[in-house]
Image (tube, rainbow, N blue to C red):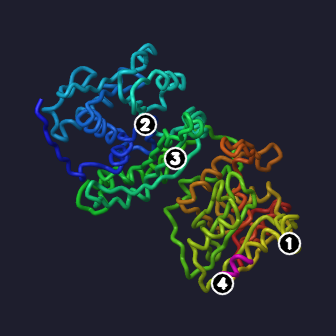
Amino acid sequence: MPKIKLKFNWKLFNPNFHHLEKELTNIYRRFIWYYGGSSSAKTYSVAQAITIIGCLLENSDTLVFRKVSATIDETIYKDFKNIIFDLKLDRFFNCQAKKIKCINGSQIVFKGLDDPEKIKGISSFKRVVLEEVSEFDYADFKQIRKRLRGMEGQQIICMFNPINKEHWIKKKVFDLEEQNQLSKSLVDHNGVLNLNIDEKYTHVSEKWEGGKINVNGKEYPPNFVVVKSTYLNNFWVVGSPCKSFGFVDIQTIADFDHDKKTDYNFYSIYALGNWGKLNKGGEFYKKFKPEKHVVDRIPYDPNKPLHISFDENLHPYLSLSIYQAAGLRSWKVDEICLEHPNNSLAHVLKEFKRKYPSNREKVFLYGDRTSLKGDSKLKQGENFFTLIEDSLKSDDYKITRRLPTKNPSVSSRGNFINEIFEENIFGIEYLISDNCTKTIEDYESVKEAPDGTKLKQRTKDPVTKITYEKYGHLTDTDDYFICEYYKLEYNKYLGKRKKGMVSKPINSQ
């Protein structure tokens, strides 16, 4: 067959395709995980890459699995057929029943896993694509990975929406591997591809499955790459950054905005691609509703003071929350949660200074009063708060400490904050910026103990092997800030509770 030279305009593709283009040619990548929100072009980009790179360029075979065979024709198979015609490649392909053949001899075969026997005989394929892998059993995945062998550069490509943080994908795959963040910048072959939106809304990381790979003294590159994307980097939903191609789908964007206001958990999973929380009940902050209390990113106003609140625990991260306020209104603008090995006060303060340079306005400091205690590792007179103050003052921040004379009880402060969420007690309004994703997760996840306090559930980090309290740290920083900033209202609330009186709005001072 004579060689045919094909040239594709890079404007035909989304960022996901360009990441795949890079990873499919990396012979050390065994596992490629594509996950995130819906309408983020995951499946479409994988189909483009397999068709162009796998079939046309490599002349390699691909096996595509779905859990149920009956769903194939109107889903993944249809996507591949549409791409072939969209890219005007139909003269190179013959679409048959659950099989697409290329004129160079390569093929794409589609199967369902209704019958586990279909997993056998997959070793002749260069790649196996698992579409909607969240519908697969863990046993299915284990069998596929064991039976794909005998050829250099064989890959397993998995796509899914992270519907449940208790799913085996997270528990048995993602949580068990060491992860390194990768650069997300992309360029085309001429070095001119400008994908600034990709930098903001695509997250790429690599992992060593089961630890670093070392054979006969040689250390190999990571075999595991994860790409998370959302509709915000699909140029056929939000348009391209340069506005010269793509399409702005107003109705799809409006639909996601509607989900955000009416069902934030659904929005978090299917728009933002975050791990879902399907098992609700027993929450400590039972009146917290993301659709009501979480708002579009609130910009930092350099002409207003900053309020910062710390939680001293180091694991899973050292927590710093940043707020601004005006009278009875307050809002959380940011969170800084640095994980191991950067979960130190020095690293957190460095990041704070980078994001919020010193200005003429004051910075008010909040936190757990018990952090005033001495520490044998520190000099006489030093504690957690003096370290913060000395660091910030050295860079000309005007720092003022605001700590309670004693910490408010956990159950009382929880009741107070729940009433703020439910009915804006005393006219108080507290909102959270949607970039504070770990804070939102904390509010949704921390449970109530039988005695009315926070249930301190503990877990072990698979990498550091350190046991820590999984949730409650960021909401603790909010508790410290809210109870101290609204100190008059909080004391009034406690007094009214003792008297059994109905609360009425008062002015904050």
For mark 3, give the secondary structure: loop
* Crowd around label 1: few <14 · some 14–19 · many ≥20 (10 Å): few
Compared with residue 1, is residue 382 higher up or lower down, i.e. above or below? below
* Crowd around label 3: few <14 · some 14–19 · many ≥20 (10 Å): many
The mark lying in front, picked from 3 and 1, is: 1
Q: Is residue 418 magenta?
A: no
Q: Position of residue 69 (x, y in %)?
A: 37, 20
* Nearer to us in this view, 136 or 407: 136
For mark 1, give the secondary structure: loop
**Residue 67 in which image quadrant:** top left
Q: Residue at x 87, y 74 (%)?
A: 381
Q: Give the amino acid at mark 4.
A: Asp
Earlier residue among tags 2 and 1: 2
* Nearer to us in this view, 204 or 296: 204
The magenta stretch spans which residues? 390-395
CB atoms of marks 3 and 1 within 8 Å: no
Give the labeled residue for mark 2: 159
Q: Give the amino acid at mark 3.
A: Asn
Give the labeled residue for mark 4: 396
Q: Position of residue 494 (x, y in %)?
A: 81, 64
Distance (Cα) linking label 3 and label 1: 43 Å
Q: Give the amino acid at mark 1.
A: Lys
Q: Quadrant of the C terminus?
A: bottom right
Furthest residue to the front? 217
Earlier residue among tags 3 and 2: 2
Give the labeled residue for mark 3: 274
The mark lying in front, picked from 2 and 1, is: 1
